[in-house]
Amino acid sequence: MIAVAIDGPAGAGKSTIAKRVSGELGYIYVDTGAIYRTVALACIRSNTAIEDVQAVEALLPSLDIRLIFFNGEQHILLGDEDVSEAIRTENVSMAASRVSAIPSVRQYLLDLQRNFARNDNVIMDGRDIGTVVLPNAQVKIFLTASPQIRAKRRVLQLQEQGMEADYEKILYDIIQRDYNDTHRETAPLKAAENAIEVDTSSMTLEEVVQKITEIIKEQTL
Ligand code: DC
C-alpha cells in the first residue's frame, strides 16, 4: 500500500490539493482535520467545556464517528448525521484547534486514522501525519503559504460561497491557530525530517497539483 502524508498549517491548501491529486491517482483521500472538527462539534453541542479535559475524555467513547466515501467525496458522520458542512464554521475551527491539543484525544483518534492506510492507497492530510500517524509513509509533503496569502484565499473561498468575510479577523484566527498547532506539546505541527517542503504562496492551484503529483510519482516509482 502507498501512503502519502500531507501536513501543513491551516489554509495552506492541503485539502483542495489532496482531493485533486487523490482523484487523479485513484487514491483514497482522508481529511484528518474533519475528525478533530467532529469531536469539537460534539463538545459544543453537548456543552462540554474543552478546558475540562476529563469531560472531553468522558465524551469520546460515546461518539460514533465514521468517514464514508460517496461519489469520491469524503463525508463525515456523527452518529447518523452527516456533519460535513456543520464542522466548517470558524467557531468549530477554533474549538478543533483546542480539542486537538489534548493528548488523550490524539491518542484516541490514532487507530481510526491508521486504519484507513491499511487496505488502500491513501493521501492523508493533517498536522502530524508524516511525524506520528504514518511515520512510514512513502511520500511526505509539508505544504505551506504565508499567513496573509492563506487569509486571502479563505476570504475568496467564503465570498464564493456568498458568505461575509472579514480579512483581519480571518488573518488573526489563522495566526492564532498556527500558534496553537505548533506550540502544543503532543504531536505539534512540524515537518517530518524527510518531508519535502512546498511553499504555495506564489503558486496557482494547478501548479501545486502538478508539483505534488510529480513528487508522488517520482517517490513511488
Ligand atoms: O485541517 P483542519 O483545519 O480541518 O484541522 C482542524 C484542527 O484540527 C486544526 O486546528 C488542527 C487539528 N488537527 C490536528 O491537530 N492534527 C491533524 N492530523 C489534523 C488536524
Image (tube, rainbow, N blue to C red):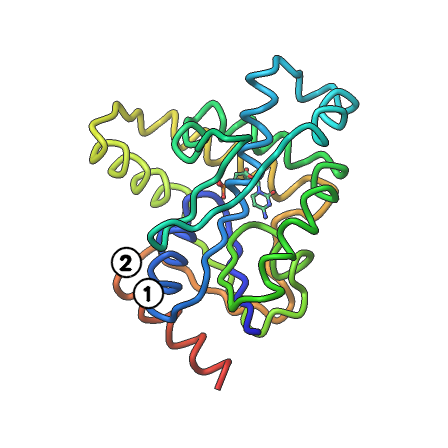
Residue at the image point whose x is 54% and y is 62% from the top: 5
Secondary structure of the residue carrying tag 1 is helix
Is disc 2 surrounded by few (<14), some (14 to 19) or many (20+) residues within 10 Å? some
Looking at the image, residue 9 sits to the left or right of residue 155; the answer is right
Q: Residue furthest right?
A: 54
Q: Look at label 1 and name its amino acid.
A: Val
Q: Look at label 2 and name its amino acid.
A: Leu
Q: Which mark is residue 205?
A: 2
* Foreground of the two, 59 or 21: 59
Which image quadrant is residue 133 in? bottom right
Tag 1 residue: 209
Secondary structure of the residue carrying tag 2 is helix
Q: Residue furthest bottom?
A: 221
Q: Position of residue 78 (x, y in %)?
A: 53, 31
Residue at the image point whose x is 47% and y is 43% from the top: 10
159 vs 147: above or below:
above
Marks 2 and 1, how far apart at CA: 6 Å
Ligand 1 image position (quadrant): top right
Is disc 1 surrounded by few (<14), some (14 to 19) or many (20+) residues within 10 Å? some
Q: Position of residue 90 (x, y in %)?
A: 43, 26
Q: Are marks 2 and 1 in contact (CB under 8 Å)?
A: yes
Looking at the image, residue 209 sits to the left or right of residue 215; the answer is left
Looking at the image, residue 206 sits to the left or right of residue 19; the answer is left
* Foreground of the two, 40 or 128: 40
